[in-house]
Amino acid sequence: MVTRNNKKIINNLKTARGQIDAIIRMIEEDRYCVDISKQILAVQSLLKKANMAILKSHVKECVKHAIEIGEGDEKIEEVFEILDKYAR
């Protein structure tokens, strides 16, 4: 459950959505490849930032609670699975 940073996360995702629309237009307009690539990298950065904020909230709230009630192993494993995907 993400609560604290919802507004910031949503703003990042909306910005990324707008940038993706712009990238599609750039491709349709046959714009310079390097410029398109730079925009794709900017979107990836926004998505990564949003994802990290969600994961941080998850650890601080859900994982912490699961550990407190003695059920943390599954939640911890979920976080490691996500981090493993990040490392690839």
Image (tube, rainbow, N blue to C red):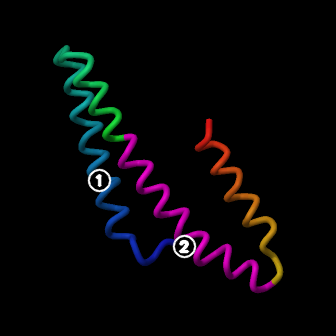
Q: Amino acid at mark 1?
A: Lys
Q: Name the element at disc 1.
A: helix
Whether 88 is drawn above or below 45: the answer is above
Front residue of this view, candidates 4 and 24:
4
Front residue of this view, candidates 45 and 21:
45
Q: What residue do we see at 20% from left, 24% from top?
A: 26
Q: Which residues are magenta?
A: 44-69
Q: Could you tell whether 77 is left or right of 38 in the image?
A: right
Q: Which residue is mark 1?
A: 14
The image quadrant of residue 41 is: top left
What number is the disc on residue 33? none
Q: Estimate the x, y position of residue 13 in percent, counting from the top left.
A: 35, 53
Q: Estimate the x, y position of residue 76 in percent, counting from the top left.
A: 73, 64
Q: Name the element at disc 2.
A: loop
- First in sequence: mark 2 vs mark 1: 2
What number is the disc on residue 1? 2
Q: What residue do we see at 67% from left, 73% from top?
A: 63
Question: Hey, which residue is sitting farthest front in the picture?
Answer: 87
